[in-house]
Each structure stands twice: as structure tokens, then as C-alpha cells.
Image: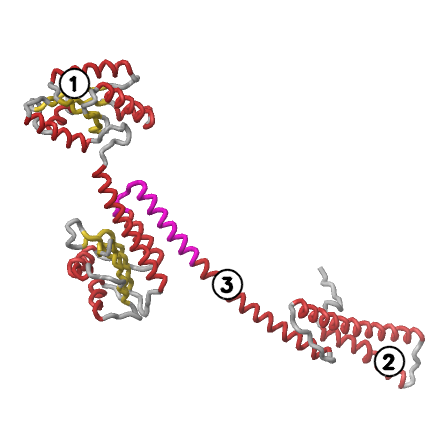
Amino acid sequence: MKQKISVADSSLKRRVCIAIALVSLLPLTVLSYYSFGYDVCFWTTLILFMIISLGWWVVFETFFAAVKIYAHSRNILRNMGEKVFLIPDEVQNLEKTIDLLSNKVKSSLEQLKGFTQMTGDLNKEISRTVLILSTVLQTNDLLSKEAPAEEVIKLIINHLRNLMRIEACFCGLENRNHSKFGTIVRSDIGFLRIENFFKKKGSELFLIKEMIVVDSHNKPKRYSQWVQELDVKNVVIAPITAKGRVIGVIGVGNNEDKFSFSKDDLELVSFFSQNITLIWQYEKVSAKAEELKVIDYLTGLYNEKLIKERLNEEIKRSTLYQRPCGFIAVQIINYDKYREKHGLIKAEKVFKETAKIFKNTLRPVDIAGRIEDDTLGAILIESNKRQSQEVADNLKKRLKRFCESGIEWNISVAESPIHGITAKELMSFVQGNNKI
């Protein structure tokens, strides 16, 4: 396909050359031809006139294009709020205008680069914040599910390592005798190395009051040996405190040359050390609450811990006053199979109804509770085996009237001191195969 040739598509320099050729060179050639005595006919003159007109048309077209560029550039300056030059020479005015616009474009590009950098930094900060919030949410989720503290702390340490992009990370907490640290979790650092570090520096770690930083900008001589023992060049160790007492440490480190921890890095380590403090306190409170808890959540009866304590007390009292003490237990034999077949909700409903019937069969002075996942038990105050068996027979009749399809019960009775002189012995006896 042939390419279409147009004067308007040519460059400004080429159009000027064409205009000069049409306006001057061709007429001069004809005049030279005429000056040598040759006649020029009418048609030649007409063609010459048309060629000159075409040349002037190209000249004016080029001129108006320049004027259009000039006016357009001035309008751009006005729209940008810049002062318009008032120079009589349009060419100089256009040159200054173009220079000013070029400077504006360069300045805008530099600002755009700055904004791009700021946007990148902001995106990094947002990603960092999102990861921190994600860690907090996952931590709360694990705590709500009563996950072990070690599992939660391990999650925190792994997230801390990813956020700071470091090589080594570890956390140690005091053990139960409050005398030394034990490793809770570590990442990319040898177990023996960190255990030896805790063993050698344990007494000093308990005295830490502030965060310890060792890097290219911070080289405290007191802790120079610490980085050697941990086999890292840069390290941050932050104390984990509770009620003003150091209960553990959290540390991060790497082996990069000319590296220094930023302010954000230090704040992040401090933030996670505070989170570990909260986890430690939560575990302590949960353990204390578990010790104080005496009611079973499903049945509303006493739990196994309280039943054992009260049964031991009743056995001692009955021995002291030479009075009997009975104990009765009812077990849903196929509770696990029933739960798998009908679902947890229906199985718990059956167990709650069994507990209600069991409680209503007893006397007000008797003490009932849940002693196993599928077993209920009760202390029958001053009841011998015959009296306990009467209670068991009455309970069996009531349970038959309840008659849930697919449920089987096993009812057992015991008496102290015949079947045992401790709560453990009586409960073991009724949880055997002594079916009524």
C-alpha cells in the first residue's frame, strides 16, 4: 500500500524549504529563462502565478501554525496560574514560554517521583500494620479457644520474624520454681545455644530494666559477649515484665554487616513483649479460675474436683462419728456412640435431662456432680448400702420412664468404709462393672 504524502505531515524545516523553493527559486528560474530572450507564454505565466500562490500558502500555513502554538502555550500558562510574558518579540516570548513549561514539567515529574516513593513507603507501613493487627486477632482467637500459651507465643515469634525480616528469634520465660529461664520458642537458633545462654546469663537477665540493643550504632561493651554466645552480630533483647518483675525475655538478631535496628523495629519488639506479658498473665488467671471453678458448665451440678474434696470430708466425718457414707454413680454407657450418631447438641440434651432426673431423685442434703464426661455421681449423706440401693432403684425407674431411644445406663452404689476409705477408692469402685 502506497504511503500518502502530505505537506501538512512534513516537518517545519521541510515546509519552509518547500515554501522558499515555490516562492523564489522557481520564479527566479523562469525570470532567468526570460532574461536570455526567450518568450514566456500566457500559460507559463499562469502556472508560475499558481506556483507562487502555493508557496505563499505554505508560508502562511507555517506561520499560523507557529502562532497557534504561541497562543496555546500562553493559555496553558494562564490556566496554571503563571504570569504571561509581555515581550514584543513573539519568538522570544514563545521560547521563554516553552522553557517555563519545560521547567514545570520537570518539577512535576520530580514531585511525582516523590509521591511515588511516599506511596510505596505508605503501602509498606499499611502492610506492616495489617500484619500486626492480624497477629493480634489470631492471638485473641487462640486464647478464646483456650490454646496453650506456648502455641500462642510461637505464633507471635514467627510473625515478629516475618515483620522484621530477621534471621534469629527466641523467647524464654521463667519456669515454675522462679529460679531460671526456660526456652518457650526459638527460630533459626540452636536449642543448646539458647539454653546455655539462659543458663549462663539467667541471673543478669532477671535484672534487665530496659531493652538491650547491639548493632553497628550501639556497641555496649557490657553485652559484647552476649552476641558472641548467641552467634549473631546484631541483637535486640527486650524484658518481659509483669508487676514490675522480669518474667522472661524476647530477642531478635541477625548477622548483617553495618546494620542498625530502626525505631520502628524497637517499638515492634517492645509491642510483642507486652503481648507476651498479657498472655502470661491470662494463663495465670485462667489457671487460678480453673482451680476455683466448682460448677460443671453443662449440667449445673458440681464438678469432679469438688465432689472428690467433699467426699473425702464426708468419709472423715462418717469415720469420726461412726456413721455410714454412701456414694452413687450413673453412667451413660454408649454416650460416645450416641453422640457420633445423633450429634453433639442432642447428646448434651440427653445428658442434661439425665442430670436433672438424677438431681431430683436425691435428697436436698445429698451432693450431686459430674465426675466423668459420661458419668454423674452423688454423695449420699449418712446412707448405708441398702439405703443407697433404694435410691438407685428409684433412679432406675425414673430413667426408664424417660426412656430415650438408644440410651443405656449403668447405676452403681458404694459405701464407706466397706468399699473404700478414700474418695478415690469409692469412685473407682462405682466406675467399675458393678451394675445394678
Q: CA distance from mark 3 to mark 1?
A: 80 Å
Residue nearest the observer in this picture, 227 or 417: 417
Which is in the foreground here, disc 1 or disc 2? 1
Residue 391 image-quadrant placement: top left
The answer to the question of whether label 2 and label 3 lie on touching residues, with beta carbons closer than 8 A, is no
Mark 1: few/some/many CA within 10 Å (<14, 14-19, 20+): few
Q: CA distance from mark 2 to mark 3?
A: 64 Å
Query: Which residue is denoted by mark 3 in the rendering?
Result: 116
On the image, the x and y values in percent for residue 325 come to: 11, 23
- Horizontal side of 264 relative to 214 (left or right) equals right
On the image, the x and y values in percent for residue 209 come to: 24, 62
Q: CA distance from mark 1 to mark 2?
A: 138 Å
Mark nearer the N terminus (3 vs 1): 3
Query: Which residue is denoted by mark 1 in the rendering?
Result: 435
Mark 1: which amino acid?
A: Lys
On the image, the x and y values in percent for residue 339 come to: 30, 26
- Classified by dominant secondary structure, the portion drawn in magenta counts as helix
Q: Residue at x 48, y 64 (%)?
A: 117
Q: Residue at x 18, y 56 (%)?
A: 195
Query: Which residue is denoted by mark 2 in the rendering?
Result: 30
Residue nearest the observer in this picture, 425 or 221: 425
